[in-house]
Image (cartoon, rainbow, N blue to C red):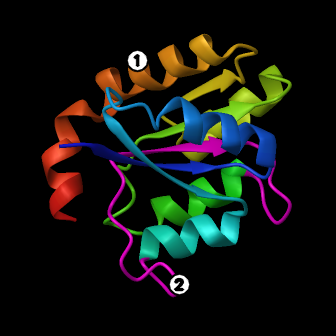
Amino acid sequence: MTVPVLIVDDNAGFLRVVRSLFAEPASPFTVYTVETGAEALAFLARLPPFTDAPRPAFVVLDFRLPDMNAPAILGRLAAQADLATLPVLVLSQAGWESEAAEAAAAGATRFRAKPSGVRALHDLVVDFWKEHAHGDVDSADRG
């Protein structure tokens, strides 16, 4: 059984790295990617074109997207009972303390600067899953 995870980032290169990193046969994850906040919200609400989307065990969310920032998305998730407790790892290119504070106030489970290396990114995502989402894997699959 693999764990569905949603990665939300507008950087095509970053998404390509993430998809290849977790496409390995030993990976516990099935990665779904979108590039905007609107697409993330549609995916999570299972709106077209995401009507068959699985419920992710957790979300990895870029702080700055072209249409909205992470606190705006987190606020929308918090307003929906079925999504309010979804673990969200917010990543930022800069990792500024002000962004960390905004993300935390909006309900992010964790905030980190984007790792510069592939192995560090892998370890960050796996550690987040183990600490915050591992217990929700079965319920995420039933979605």
Magenta stretch: dominant secondary structure: loop
Circle 2 — which element? Answer: loop
In the rendered view of the protein, which quadrant contains the N terminus? top left
Residue at figure coordinates x 62%, y 27% from the top left: 111
Residue 110 position within the rendered picture, expressed as x and y whole percent measured from the top left: 53, 28
Residue at figure coordinates x 57%, y 47% from the top left: 7
Q: Which residue is mark 1?
A: 127
> Type of residue at label 2?
Pro
Label 1 or label 2, whichever comes before in sequence order: 2
Residue at figure coordinates x 71%, y 49% from the top left: 9
Residue 89 position within the rendered picture, expressed as x and y whole percent measured from the top left: 54, 35
| Residue 23 sits inside the magenta stretch | no
Q: Which residue is mark 2?
A: 49
Report which quarter residue 27 is drawn in.
top left
Label 2 neighbour load within 10 Å: few <14, some 14-19, many 20+? few
Question: In the displayed structure, would residue 10 be above or below residue 97?
Answer: below
> Type of residue at label 1?
Asp
Residue at figure coordinates x 32%, y 61% from the top left: 55
Residue 37 position within the rendered picture, expressed as x and y whole percent measured from the top left: 69, 63
Circle 1 — which element? Answer: helix
- Using residue 59 as the reference point, say whether residue 52 is left or right of it: left
Question: In the displayed structure, would residue 4 be above or below residue 95?
Answer: below
List the single residue furthest toward the bottom.
48
Residues drawn in magenta: 46-69
Cα separation between marks 1 and 2: 31 Å
